[in-house]
Image (tube, rainbow, N blue to C red):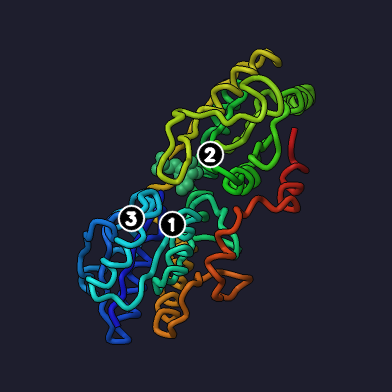
Amino acid sequence: MKIGVLTGGGDCPGLNAVIRAVVRKSDNYDSRVVGIRNGWKGLVDIAYTDLDTKMVSGILHIGGTIIGTSRTNPFKDPGGPDKVLKNFRLLGLDALVAIGGEDTLGAASKLFERGLPVVGVPKTIDNDLSGTDFTFGFDTAVSIATDAIDRIHTTAESHNRVMVVEVMGRNAGWIATFSGIAGGAHAILIPEKPIDVDEVCDLILRRHSRGKNFSIVVVAEGAKFAEKPGESGQLIVQETKTDEFGHVRLGGISQVLAKEIEKRTTFESRYVVLGHIQRGGSPTAHDRVLATRFGVFATEMAHRNEFGKMAALQGKEIVPVPLAEATAQSKTVNMGIFHIAEEFFG
Ligand code: F6P
């Protein structure tokens, strides 16, 4: 069997661990693996590299992806899907392992309907893909954000400041919720719950009236204001230009929020945007194990001709889940866990 593997969308710690697992497991089957360069772009333009066990040696712990990634949407151009199918055949491939989030796997699902024998692996630091309890990369992002909040704690306390920490999370506040709980945040703001600035200020004022002189607010970049500042219900964006999947570039909500908190409470406030630091560097041990399990399972699925599905984590088991089901809608934060976080607000 000849298997193609591609990584699409934003990079994520653990991508190389999946690639290594696909190559090593394929080698045990006597199958060959081709790395498609830069996500779907490599199948539209034909850009690839042969992968063997030597090439994936020493990459388990390395962040990023050795085959590159892009936000190319093969459905953007009407001829794109046919190009992908034609080039897949031209490369002599029997199966494709697509490692990505809802955009990459959404395209995989539609290409499967057109006859592409594809298996998915769920990737995103945002953990917003349905059908799987966790995506790989999320644990690393939460660890990085928690470490940052720990550091923010000491400087916030020294200066008697309110610190607003902005983390990633376009549709869902998983990173904000988990790192906020782990880092002991005094308020956590997520896309699932519109921000009431007065409520946030009340929490801070209540805390300071108890003798505390600093507060930490964690906000997901995709959170929206229920009222002014900013147009109500609007995302705070860096750029209104969209990528090929229709996403604007988010960022800046912490700055708006810190200014407003300072105005309404009179407490000196600062903001920090963690940005791509959350996506860079070495994956945690948890993500290396999860990525490896996904890679091995996806390769087994390809050899069983079990296409149109994604390797998913449900409970402690890796199971196949239809791509159409996984990409139908974003997985938002479970309010049970958010209510736990709320117990510690203020
Ligand atoms: O992969 C998802 C994500 O991490 C979002 O949370 C964020 O908005 C986006 O990537 C930013 O990615 P980039 O700057 O690479 O487009």
Residue 127 in which image quadrant: bottom right
Q: Hey, what amino acid is under mark 1?
A: Thr
SS class, disc 1: helix
Q: Earlier in the sequence, mark 2 or mark 1?
A: 1
Q: Earlier in the sequence, mark 1 or mark 3?
A: 3
Q: Nearer the viewer, residue 36 or 273?
A: 36
Q: Which mark is residue 104?
A: 1
Of tags 2 and 1, the one toward the viewer is: 1
The residue under the point 76% across, 47% down is: 339
Q: Is residue 113 above or below residue 330?
A: below
Mark 3 neighbour class, 10 Å CA radius: few under 14, some 14 to 19, many 20 or more = few
Mark 2 neighbour class, 10 Å CA radius: few under 14, some 14 to 19, many 20 or more = many
Residue 32 in which image quadrant: bottom left
Q: Which mark is residue 1?
A: none
- Circle 1/circle 3 CB separation < 8 Å: no
The residue under the point 66% across, 30% down is: 233
The residue under the point 46% across, 76% down is: 307
Q: Quadrant of ligand 1?
A: top left
SS class, disc 2: strand
Q: Position of residue 338 (x, y in %)?
A: 72, 47
Q: Which residue is mark 2?
A: 167
Q: Which mark is residue 79?
A: 3
Q: Earlier in the sequence, mark 2 or mark 3?
A: 3
Q: Position of residue 178 (x, y in %)?
A: 62, 49
Q: Hey, what amino acid is under mark 3?
A: Gly
The residue under the point 69% across, 35% down is: 187
Label 1 vs label 3: CA separation?
A: 17 Å
